[in-house]
């Protein structure tokens, strides 16, 4: 007989399946460059955070799975260091801010018991909308964390904006706000952090 699973188990298993399907990058100068940037960040803003970095090849560029595993593509080694640091700091922000647990809490509110088809079908619409709203908020929070981390490493806010633009101007998706919105949100975060008003450059 199949074991009863709650939604937290299901999310965990699905993250593990995705992690298992990824290809680890060979040890070499590219993987090493990604690891070094990650260690710089970790030492500065997350030294006692439980987190594992896996450098991978193929897709994706970077993602946090299961709350404590950051996957980062070895191609980040070819990007300017500001971009690499921003991308990794953003993922570290997801870990540090407990976003995975918040995702679990949200799913659990919609699917409190055993995960069966009727239960998930019934809430699919509202759950999808709430999850998407939450995902967008998490993106803004992770970006603000990355901005803060870059500044602690001595980089400028402009390097953070450039890093976001470097990823291309994306439209809204279910999980990510459009780049334009992320830039605006980052500017607001910067204004909140800066002791002096900053001049507008674009
Ligand atoms: Zn993110």
Image: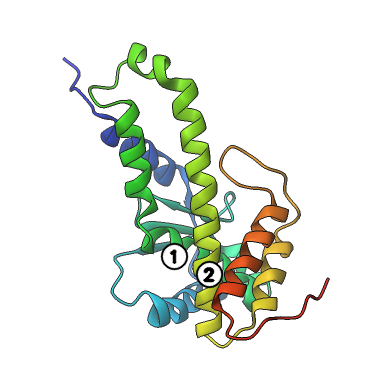
Q: Residue at x 34, y 64 (%)?
A: 51
Image-quadrant location for residue 52 = bottom left
Label 2's element? helix
Residue furthest top as drawn: 118
Q: Which residue corresponds to mark 1?
A: 92
Residue 25 % position (x, y): 51, 60
Q: Residue at x 68, y 53 (%)?
A: 181
Nearest to the observer: residue 23 or residue 93: 93
Q: Which residue corresponds to mark 2?
A: 146
Residue 117 % position (x, y): 36, 14
Q: Residues within 10 Å of mark 1 (few under 14, many from 20)?
A: many
Nearest to the observer: residue 191 or residue 82: 191
Q: Residue at x 47, y 47 (%)?
A: 22
Q: Residue at x 58, y 37 (%)?
A: 174
Q: Is residue 171 left or right of residue 31?
A: right
**Mark 1 and mark 2 residues within 8 Å of each other at the beta carbon:** yes
Label 1's element? helix
């Amino acid at each position: 007989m199949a074991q009863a699973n709650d939604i937290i188990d299901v999310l965990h298993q699905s993250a593990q399946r995705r992690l298992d399907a990824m290809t680890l990058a060979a040890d070499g100068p590219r993987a090493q460059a990604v690891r070094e940037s990650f260690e710089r960040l970790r030492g500065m803003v997350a030294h006692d955070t439980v987190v594992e970095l896996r450098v991978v090849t193929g897709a994706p560029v970077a993602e946090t799975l299961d709350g404590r595993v950051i996957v980062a593509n070895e191609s980040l080694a070819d990007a300017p260091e500001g971009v690499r640091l921003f991308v990794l700091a953003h993922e570290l922000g997801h870990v540090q801010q407990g976003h995975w647990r918040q995702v679990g809490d949200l799913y659990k509110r919609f699917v409190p018991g055993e995960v069966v088809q009727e239960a998930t079908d019934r809430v699919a619409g509202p759950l999808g909308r709430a999850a998407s709203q939450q995902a967008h908020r998490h993106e803004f929070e992770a970006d603000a964390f990355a901005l803060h981390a870059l500044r602690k490493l001595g980089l400028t806010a402009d390097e953070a904006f450039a890093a976001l633009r470097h990823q291309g101007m994306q439209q809204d998706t279910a999980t990510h706000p459009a780049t334009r919105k992320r830039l605006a949100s980052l500017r607001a975060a910067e204004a909140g952090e800066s002791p002096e008003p900053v001049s507008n450059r674009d």
